[in-house]
Amino acid sequence: MEQIPQYRKLYELLRKHIVEGIYEEGSLLPSENELCATYQMTRPTVRHALDTLVKEGLILKQQGKGSIVRKQIQNIGILSISGTASAIGVRYLKTDILQKPEIRVWPENFPF
């Protein structure tokens, strides 16, 4: 049976608390030191869990302040631009113009 990494266990727990509203939008998560002591984990393990939450967009890390819970994005489909961006990461998206834009006149009976 496959063993779940420690960072993943903490990530899942914190994610569950955020989704269920235990940690509300704008609230601070416990500090890295507090999480280390509470869950008996090393600091790199805790950082890995928090970095995963940052990548998922659930928290925002601010130096000197801590990890802040962000507003939940609701129901974004993978086929939408924002859904694709959140799924694969904005830094991996690239826009290429394949055809030069042209101005066209709409027919008068065009159904808006």
Image (spheres, rainbow, N blue to C red):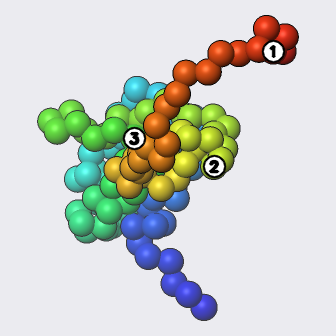
Q: Which residue is mark 2?
A: 78
Disc 3 target residue: 59
* Residue sitting nearer the eye, 37 or 62: 62
Compared to residue 108, the image places residue 9 above or below, namely below
Q: Amino acid at mark 1?
A: Phe
Q: Report the disc number at residue 110.
A: 1
Q: Residues within 10 Å of mark 3 (few under 14, many from 20)?
A: many
Q: Nearer the viewer, mark 1 or mark 3?
A: 1
| Helix, strand or loop under label 2 | loop
Where does the N terminus fall, quadrant-wise? bottom right
Q: Residue at x 24, y 66 (%)?
A: 44
- CA gap, disc 3 to disc 2? 21 Å
**Which residue is depicted at the point 49% across and 42% down?**
99
Residue 29 in view of the camera: yes
The foreground one among 79 and 86 is: 79
Front residue of 84 and 54: 84
